[in-house]
Image (cartoon, rainbow, N blue to C red):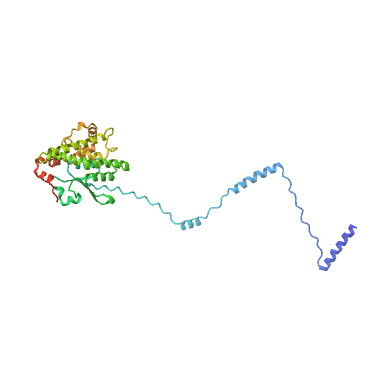
Amino acid sequence: MAAATSRKTSSRAGAAAARSGSPAKAKAAPPAPTKAKPLSAKQASTKSATTKPVAKKQASAKPASAKPAAAKAAAAKAPPVKAAPRPVPAPPPRPAKPIEFYYWPTANGWKVSIMLEECGVPYVLRPVNIGRGEQFTADYLKISPNGRIPAIADPDGPGGKEISVFESGAVLQYLGRKTGKFYPADERGRVAVDEWLFWQVSGLGPMAGQANHFRQFAPETIPYAIERYTNEVGRLYNVMNRRLAGRDYLAGPYSIADIACYGWIMSHQQQGQNLAAFVHLKAWFDRVGARPGVQRGLAVGRELRSASPSDLRSSQDSRRVLLNQKPR
């Protein structure tokens, strides 16, 4: 039965082939896959040993470098590398122009000479002989309208422009701000210094000056005036004495308040005062006087003292100039 079916199928195929005019061909079956023979342990070990280094070598292989010509072309197209500019050294600081110091050796003049020396500020001394009336010249009155010494002209003032300053207290404040010395930057400390500075310029200086005048230079003896101003100076000395109990200086650290007062205490004998009676004031006076800057300041223009107001008794011309001033 199976053979008959096979023959029948074959006959049909032959008939179909005859009809198409081509002999019938049987389809070739795909070749059966061949199974790889398993490797022996020795062969596997040998294969592993020979293939791994090759893979490692291939993995580590580097790409071929660019051709020299291409590298040169790329370098030619690249913008040139500029060298970093060398730093320009800062110009040396411009030396400070010296302050012009208009001065005569008096209690008020010493305030500024001491301050300049204490601060180390360069200055040029411009003596103003007050016994000859040089303080009333037109040029000086432009700097000091009140016709008094001291005064300064600073060519390196605010904004680099010249400025002139008159009145000794104002000069001390200006120099303190300019140099940052002997004048506190904090408001509380500055107020304390200003209190004693203004106390001096409005009280100690004028009263001591009047006591000195009526005791030394008045054309006639006026007991009331002598007693009045001598007592007032004594009162002011005692104010300082109380203030200095338990402290070295008037307003905290050494300041322009101490500088302002020192020159007026120097003439305590002419004012009728015994400094030994004011223990704390005497200790302060010795302490301030021992400062090298104070000593240098007092030495400024010492040779000019021969024509200063201390010699008014022997100079009638100076007496007329200084003691008989009238509105101008």
Give me the residue at 20% from left, 31% from top: 277
Nearer-the-camera pick, 50 or 30? 30
Give me the residue at 32% from left, 41% from top: 188
Nearer-the-camera pick, 58 or 109? 109
Q: Percent from the top left, x then y, of residue 34?
A: 75, 51
Residue at far front of view: 224
Query: What quarter of the picture does the N terminus occupy?
Result: bottom right
Position of 306 compared to 14: left or right? left
Q: Is residue 326 above or below residue 280?
A: below
Nearer-the-camera pick, 57 or 323? 323
| The quadrant where residue 177 appears | top left
Residue at far right of view: 1
| The quadrant where residue 120 appears | top left
Give me the residue at 85% from left, 64% from top: 12
| The quadrant where residue 255 appears | top left
Q: How many marks?
A: 0
Q: Percent from the top left, x then y, of residue 275?
A: 20, 33
Give me the residue at 19% from left, 51% from top: 142
Q: Percent from the top left, x then y, of residue 36?
A: 73, 48
Position of 138 compared to 249: left or right? left
Nearer-the-camera pick, 235 or 7? 235
Q: Percent from the top left, x then y, of residue 19?
A: 83, 68
Position of 134 compared to 163: left or right? left
Q: Is residue 78 above or below residue 178?
A: below
